Image (spheres, rainbow, N blue to C red):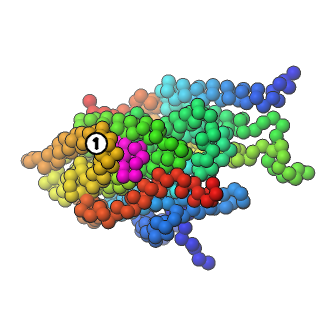
Amino acid sequence: MLAFLNDPGVLHGIVVLGTLILFFIGLYGLLAKRHLLKVLIGIALMELSVYLLFIGLATSPGETAPILSDGLRSFTHMADPVPQALTLTAIVIGLAVLALGVSLAIQYHRLTGRADVASLTELKEPR
Amino acid sequence: MTLPLTPVWFVALPLLLAFASPLWVRLRLLMPLLVGTPAVLLLLALALLPEVRIAPLVETIVIAPPLGIHLQLDSASWILVALISFTGLLATAFIWLGDGESYLRDRRAFIFLLLLIAGCNGMVLTGDLFNLYVFLEISGVSAYALSALRRDAPALEAGLKYLLIGSVAAVFFLFAVVLVYLQIGQLNLAAIAEGFAGIPGPMQILIGLLMLVGLGIKAELFPFNFWVPDIYQGSHPVVAGLYSGFLVKAFLFVLFHLVFLLLADPGVAGAWLMGLGAATMLVAEVVALRQDDMRRMLAYSSLGQIGLIALALGFGAEATTAGGLFHMANHTLIKLVLFLTAAVLMRSFVSARLADLAGAGRARPLAAAFFVLGALAVMGLPPLNGFASKLWILKGFAEAGVFWPVALVLLAALIEAGYYFRWIKVLYEPRADLPEARAVERWGYAPIAVAAGLIVLLGVAPFLVDDLFIEGAQALLDRGAALSAVLGAGS
């Protein structure tokens, strides 16, 4: 019944649509939410959608993991390993930045009792 | 075993030393190594210069053939690497000799400062698009942390704001990288440059826009630069001097490097960037007029000069590009003097506000004198270096018969004179109730004096370095040579 999903065109279309929706949900969170943690979550969602798009479009149905073992001796019908390696790296970087952001937000909250983006007003234009 | 002198050390040395930092704390070597690392990198850059001037050094770090990573040191990226090392050297020397705030002298600051240098060097040198993203994040993360180092409310706010806007920029840039890979299947910049023309037009525009937003935010171009003054105000002036000194310059270089490398005809993109540069310059200079915090005023002044550099580089003629690169170096020296002076004044009077600094020139004559020198240089008065590079840029525009940028640059210089003289006047104002200035370490003036000496030297004798910048401009603009250096002569 779901065999049509094995068509790369259909699958990639769904991936593009889904990741773009996710990207814009993240963008909405970034622009419309005021709590610092929610803003950070919005940014994390945007990052995740980019990772998903990359992995989703770089692989097609029927491809196997790019590992030579168990009788697999040639590089045919394998997914391109580069996007997966890159995405892993990007996830690690994204996690580090997110952790730094959350820790700064927590410190700011402890110091001032505020967690609202709109309350970040120590530094602003004069008058 | 001999260690070959190759470009990889510009990234590897600061990284290794940063991660071994607990050892340096125990051996009490933290401060000597903080200053020593950029000094060694500067020596390395100088040692490699004769080779670089003959042909670009392309270093391939092979993991398992055919997978490898390119580092490319040509005349253009050499200028940036030397600038990064030199700026790092002066700023860290100020931190060491100036005996300043303890949070800039501990292990965390050591790590972040070296990571910032490593990240910027990597960005400038790398020949691989994904590596570019990684280095962009390395320098980004260390910059966010450096801003927040003081851990009081303004510093944390600066760090948070920087982190939020910086991560958004990184997401947009990553999106562009992903699209490029999906279209071309390559990450090597030279290979991408070959295949870029084959991408469908709308996709090219989408990639270009995503890169423009990502790198435009990082390179502080209008309209993506609303966050900059907040960050510069909340960070320590020395750190702000590093941002203005080489972090922005590295991003600006990367932006223009990509434009000139990827596009066979950079005319349209260059025109857009010229427009953005002009808007950056004018808006920033006008807003700077009403600032009453020295760090904020310097931030806007820095934005104005960034706009001027973007204007000059975007034009894409050899003379303006060489002038733009020269102005990059000159502006770094000038802003280093101004921000370090601001650090001295802030330490003396515990404030950087206009009202609190009235009459400060009488209590701190040396600092005020350096401020005046920096201000005159940024306005472009002869015989200082700002004059030499602005003249070069203006001559380039005039030779090409394009006069609107000339008018804008002169107008911007006029506005600059307006607000800098306001600050100079206040610094020398007679004032009876001058607050007691807190003591500052005299040796802290030494790095400022070195930068000030270079401001005068490069202003009097710009011909000493002319050739370097002309070669740099040629390397930046000559797409064919850059491609054949990596891909081989047959391509």
Residue at the right extreme, as displayed: A71
Is residue A18 in sight in this rendering? yes
Q: Amino acid at mark 1?
A: Val
| Residue B268, placed above or below residue A17 | below
Q: Is residue B35 left or right of residue A80?
A: left
Residue B254: x percent and y percent?
49, 48
Main SS, magenta region, reads helix
Q: Nearer the viewer, residue A105 or B10?
A: B10
| Residue B154, placed above or below residue B134 | above
Residue A90: x percent and y percent?
62, 44
Residue marked by disc 1: B406
Residue A126: name its quadrant: top left
| Residue B374, placed above or below residue B54 | above
Q: How many numbered marks are there?
A: 1
Residue B181: x percent and y percent?
65, 42
Q: Is residue B452 left or right of residue B306?
A: left
Residue placed at 57% from the left, 36% from the top? B204
Q: The N terminus of chain A appears in which quarter of the rendering?
A: top right
SS at circle 1: helix
Judging from the image, mark 1 belongs to the subunit labelled B
Q: Residues within 10 Å of mark 1 (few under 14, many from 20)?
A: some
Is residue B137 in sight in this rendering? no
Residue B127: x percent and y percent?
57, 54
Residue placed at 75% from the left, 38% from the top? A59
Residue placed at 8% from the left, 48% from the top? B430
Residue B401: name its quadrant: top left
Q: The C terminus of chain A appears in which quarter of the rendering?
A: top left
Q: Nearer the viewer, residue B128 or B110?
A: B128
Residue placed at 63% from the left, 38% from the top? B199
Q: Is residue B149 left or right of residue B363?
A: right
Q: Which residues are magenta?
A: B304-320
Q: Nearer the viewer, residue B11 or B430?
A: B11
